[in-house]
Amino acid sequence: MKKYTVGIPDEEFIRGKVPMTKEEIRILTLAKARIEREDMVADIGAGTGSISCEAALQATDGKVFAIERKPEGIELIKVNAEKFGIENLHIIQAEAPEGMEQLPQLDRAIIGGSGSHLEPILDQLDELLKPEGRIILNCITVQTLMQCLNYMRTKENYSYETIQVQVNHWEQVGPYDMAKAANPIFIVTCVKNK
Amino acid sequence: MKKYTVGIPDEEFIRGKVPMTKEEIRILTLAKARIEREDMVADIGAGTGSISCEAALQATDGKVFAIERKPEGIELIKVNAEKFGIENLHIIQAEAPEGMEQLPQLDRAIIGGSGSHLEPILDQLDELLKPEGRIILNCITVQTLMQCLNYMRTKENYSYETIQVQVNHWEQVGPYDMAKAANPIFIVTCVKNK
Amino acid sequence: MKKYTVGIPDEEFIRGKVPMTKEEIRILTLAKARIEREDMVADIGAGTGSISCEAALQATDGKVFAIERKPEGIELIKVNAEKFGIENLHIIQAEAPEGMEQLPQLDRAIIGGSGSHLEPILDQLDELLKPEGRIILNCITVQTLMQCLNYMRTKENYSYETIQVQVNHWEQVGPYDMAKAANPIFIVTCVKNK
Amino acid sequence: MKKYTVGIPDEEFIRGKVPMTKEEIRILTLAKARIEREDMVADIGAGTGSISCEAALQATDGKVFAIERKPEGIELIKVNAEKFGIENLHIIQAEAPEGMEQLPQLDRAIIGGSGSHLEPILDQLDELLKPEGRIILNCITVQTLMQCLNYMRTKENYSYETIQVQVNHWEQVGPYDMAKAANPIFIVTCVKNK
């Protein structure tokens, strides 16, 4: 298998019918996470495991913990980890914040899905996250975004950055290139102080 | 210095007053390039060298050739390469397609600026690019986009993908988070057949 | 002066240094308001009065009440109303919800600026708004958007629609057309039940 | 039927399965057209007639000519015109530039669809368009946009403005508001000199 240094394309993941973070959003999420080789990383709401797998390939001397509640998701994470020859990925089948008691102290946490439990998840992460640690939240709803911003604004020991990304794919239709919009996503990057 | 596995943040580059590809666009451009360790890469219209430097850190067993016409750009590329301890980056001061005769056979080419010489640059790249090689074009004008699409549509041995990316930064202003738009960019990924 | 049937271009308004809702957003806001000829309309946070003036030209047999706190704004509203020969526009200098006790029963309300008093303004509007009346909120912050959505979600007698609009202007620079982004705006349309 | 002063909502048009310009784009297109009461207007590629109908309601003392090639389109235009009680709308079943010989001197032309005949259509319009007349082009492909810009750049007696509009609808899903993207559209406004 090819070893890309940055970014695995969508088509290399096995995904079934589980929704998957799109390539462009996944790579931006990982870039904002700034994972280093020895990092301990949590991926909460791991879905197909596409982010967990890429994170694990980056944190080669660290570990990634994927938390996912759905059995189909768990199966896909396993299959994808195997496909990419990943051995530093630990899978926890649970609906976060449940299962988070199994996590070690963390350098990075990525939240792809919080199932309406964002605040208790952030509370738990706050206990686990090391100084200068990072939490990256992907969200598609105003409510989840607002909860995250509200949370971070009340914490004096965090700073955050919010971007909203919209990608239009220009598809080739006969002699034309036509825009096909993808839904915009918010990516919030929360950094814990030293 | 920290070694990020994916994506160097904007603030770590020295940039002077030369315009620099923004973090999010740089990381997406590099992801689309899918650089492998031994790759020979050209960065045409290298500007501050931010893309050249990140590419060089990825192609650790390959080489990156940065072509830039402006003396300030050349100076910044040198300074940035030194800052990141890069030794596999070769700088060519020229206005492409001039200077391209110094390039070896290429695995990847990134075009950040073509100074209205896009077609002759693509002609030269077509001669240099290996099978399965990739050309990534960043463009902000309809004309450059159209020239690239027209070129690729006439070549039977290329396929291409076009995305348009728009990033809004939500800035913190007192108790509010307000959107600050960045200009949209087209990223065209051209792949040469086997 | 020309009488446009839909939409007055930006350059026809006198604006000084007061920020003005851009043409495209103003016309969409007015379209969502669906003003009818006899309507009683409030424009809260009227700024330069560009929306008030267009609304007044539509509600020819009704009235528009512009509430604005800043003296420069009040001056511009007067000047613009005069320029367009408008006689059905009443100006109230106050920081809403102050001044709203002067309002009659309303068919339409447009909120361009709420100065962090959105909830009491909505409470007042709720008392004034006739059945099938409409409130249109323009907002640029997540917090104002969220306050509006929260408010409307707790009221059983309202339905709402939210759009986010982003306009890129493609400027002509020599032989090129280059994108210049404008900040995205949320437009929330709230409709009171019969 | 209600008489809106600006903008007819999508749901009031009968549309069958013919694609229809969305409300937000239709209203912006009409605003850029700046139709006056006595205007002679052509709507080329009229589709369901939604733009033709709104234009006809604005140009109350003028006329609108809708050119459409598809029989289903023609049928819908008739039905919609009848629904809105419109009597100043003339329908021409033809694939433009065919049928354009039936057009009078024009104040405004709106091009919703050009079926790859944009240049001959623009040539014809150039002959028909009065000084200070306006042509508004909606387009979703890079090629159509580029053809229009190229055409206008070669004509000394036109100026043009290009905007790209993207609208995200935030849908209510249980307790959440989630973004649903619509494809971006280019709107080119071409103005003939005096």
Image (spheres, coloured by chain):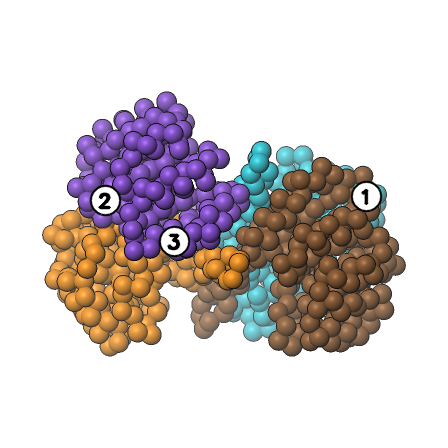
Chain colours: A purple, B orange, C brown, D cyan
Residue B102: percent from left, percent from top:
15, 65
Tell if the residue under mark 1 belongs to the same chain as the one under mark 2.
no
- Which mark is nearer the camera, 1 or 2? 2
Name the N-terminal-most of marks 2 and 3: 2
| Disc 3 residue type (three-letter) | Tyr
Q: Quadrant for residue C63, please give it.
A: bottom right
Is A137 placed above or below C7 here? above
- The structure residue drawn at horizontal position 76% and vertical position 52%, both measured from the top left corner, is C124
Check disc 2 and report its element: helix, strand or loop. loop
What chain is tagged by disc 3? A
Residue assigned mark 1: C131
Check disc 1: other Cα within 10 Å, few if <14, some if 14-19, many if 20+. Answer: some
| Disc 1 residue type (three-letter) | Pro
Tell if the residue under mark 2 belongs to the same chain as the one under mark 3.
yes
Residue assigned mark 3: A158
- The structure residue drawn at horizontal position 47% and vertical position 60%, both measured from the top left corner, is B171
Check disc 1 and report its element: helix, strand or loop. strand
Is C112 placed above or below A189 here? below
Residue assigned mark 2: A39
| Disc 2 residue type (three-letter) | Asp
Tell me the CA gap for discs 1 and 2: 58 Å
Q: Is residue A152 left or right of residue B157?
A: right
Tell me the CA gap for discs 2 and 3: 19 Å
Tell if the residue under mark 3 belongs to the same chain as the one under mark 1.
no
